[in-house]
Amino acid sequence: MSDFGVSFANLLRARFPYIYVGTWEEERVLGMIRDTARNAELVRTPRSVFTWSVTDGLVGPSAPAREICEAPLDALGFVARHADPAVFVFKDFHVFFGTDKREQDHTVVRKLRDLSTLLKNSPKPKNVVFLAPTVRLPLELEKEITVLEFDLPGVVEVRELLRGMIETNKRGGRLTVELGDADIDRFANAALGLTLHEAENAFARAMVKDARLSAADIESIYDEKRQIVRKTGIVEFVKSDVQIADVGGLENLKNWLKKRDKSWLEPAQKYGLPAPKGVLITGVPGCGKSLLAKAIGSAWQLPLLRLDVGRVFGMYIGMSEENIRSALRTAEAVAPSILWVDEIEKGFSRGGESDGGTSTRIFATFLTWMQEKVKPVFVIATANDISALPPEMLRKGRFDEIFFVDLPTRRERADIFSLHMKKKIKDAQVLGSLKITPEACAKLAEATEGFIGAEIEQVVVAALFEAYAESRALAWSDFGRAIKSTVPLSTTQAERIAEIRGWADKRAVRASEPDDVGAPQVGSAPRA
Ligand SMILES: Nc1ncnc2c1ncn2[C@@H]1O[C@H](COP(=O)(O)OP(=O)(O)O)[C@@H](O)[C@H]1O
Ligand SMILES: [Mg+2]
C-alpha cells in the first residue's frame, strides 16, 4: 500500500469528515481511493465509493446513483441521507469555495459546515473527499478539512506501468524490446517526477518512434521529462558542466559541502547521520553564489532542479500555492536531488500583504516543507539581499547553515583571475610571452581590491578585446587598462554592500577566511 493509501485509510478510520486532495491525477487517485475504501483490513468498515462532478452528477460504485443530483446542494443532501458506509468524492468542488473569477457560494459552504457534524456522528462511517487540481480552502471550513498530499508515482508504480505497456505491445507484435531488467529500472527512474499519465506518454513516444525499445531510448524519456518540467515553468532541470574547481575561493563553504557529499545515501543514514536539509548562501552579488550552486549538482552527481520563485508568483493568482507544491513534489519524486532556489528573496520577501496574502501562504508552505521533509532533497538557496527575507526563514532548523560570501579576498581574486584566464585563453598565440603564474595573478589581485568575481571575469574579457582589436598577443598593460576603466560595484554601491556585510557578520558563517587571519578585525567578532 502506498503512503497515500495508508494516510488516507487512517483518516477514513478516524472519521475525518472532509479530506482534500490537490492533484491533476484524478484517475490515479480515484483508483487508490477505491482500493483503500474497499480494504477492510485498512479501514475496518469497507465503504462504497461515489463520485460527483458537475457534468455527471452523482455516480455510484457500479452505476449512476438513483438520484443524479447535478446541483451541489442536492448532492450534499444525498450524502446526508445516505445510510450505508460510503466515501463521496467531489471533483472540482473548489470552484464553489471561490476563485478569482467566481465568488464563494455561501449556501454550499454553509451546507458543508452543517453536514460535518452529521458526518462525524452518523452511525455508519461516511467521508467526503474533495478532488481538484488546486488546493483552496474556504476560511469557514479550514478547521474541518484535512489536506492530504498526493505524491507523484514512485519507481515501483512506474516500472509496473512500463512492464505492462511492453507486454501489451509485444503481444500485438508491434514492438521489439531490447531491454534487460536493469534497463527497465533505469527507464522507470528516468521517468520519476512525471505523473503516471505523462510517464505513459513518454514511454509510448519512445516505443512508436522506431517500433523498438532499446537502452538508447532513455534519452527520449529525459527529453520528454525536460519538456514537461519546462511546461510547468516553475522548476527546470539544470544541465550543468560547472565543476567545483571552476569556482575560485570560498574554501570554507566548499569544505562544508564536501563533508556533506553522499550524506544523503543509505550508508550515512545507517551511520546515524541526519539527511542534510540545505544551505543558504547569501552575500555580495556577482561573487560566485549561483556558480557554486551549479557546481554542486555535478560534484554530487544528483539531479539539479532550479526553482524560479519569480515564476511561482507570476502565474494567475490562486494557482501559486499549487505551483509551489507541485515543484516540491517534483523535487521529492526525483530524490535524492538538489533543489536550487536562486535569489530566494525575490519571491519570499516581506511585505506580501499586497497580493492578498498569497506570498505569505506560499512562504509558509515552503517553510513547513523544509522543516518536515523526509525525502533527501538538498536545498541550496542563494540570496543577494538577505535583509529582505523574513526572519522565520533564517531560524535554526530550516537550513543547516547560512554562509556569507563577501567581496573576494586578495587570495581569492588571484584564484579567480587564474581560473578565468586559463578558461578563456586556449590559444598559446593569444598568450604570447605572458605566463599565468601565481605571481602574475597576485599582482592583478593587488590591483583589483574591491572587485567582485564577475568584474574580474570582465577584466579578462576586456583585456582580450583590447589585444584582439590590435591583432596582437595579450600584454599585461591590457589588464591594467581594463582594471582602470572599471568602477566596481563596491564603489558604486558601497552603502548597500556595507549593509549586507553588517547583517551577515553576526548571523552567517564566512564562505572564506579573510586574508589577514589572526590580525584583529574592526567591527567583527572572531568566528570559529
Ligand atoms: N568565485 C568565483 N570564481 C569564478 N568565477 C566567478 C566567481 N564569482 C563570480 N564569478 C564569475 O561571475 C559570474 C557571475 O557570478 P554568479 O555566481 O552568478 O554571482 P552571484 O553571486 O550573484 O550568484 C560567474 O558566472 C563567473 O563567471
Ligand atoms: Mg546569482
Image (cartoon, grey):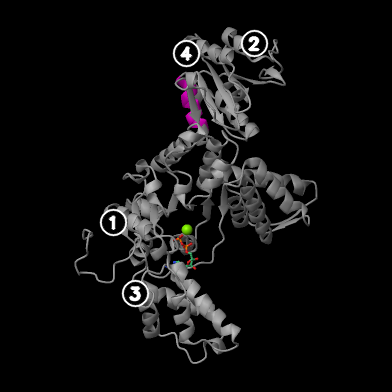
Estimate the spatial distance between the alpha carbons at disc 2 and disc 1, rounded to whole Å: 63 Å
Q: Which mark is residue 411?
A: 3
The answer to which of 369 and 496 lies nearer the viewer is 496
Residue occupying the point 52% across, 56% down? 303
Residue occupying the point 57% across, 44% down? 156
**Disc 1 crowd, CA 10 A, few/some/many (<14, 14-19, 20+):** some
Q: Name the residue under label 1.
A: 505
The answer to which of 464 and 294 lies nearer the viewer is 464
Tell me which label, 3 or 1, sits earlier in the chain. 3
Give the residue type at disc 1: Asp
Looking at the image, can residue 160 be seen?
yes
Q: Name the residue under label 4.
A: 120
The quadrant of the image that shows the C terminus is: bottom left
Residue stretch rendered in magenta on the structure:
5-14
* Residue 132: percent from left, percent from top: 60, 29
Residue occupying the point 47% across, 52% down? 343
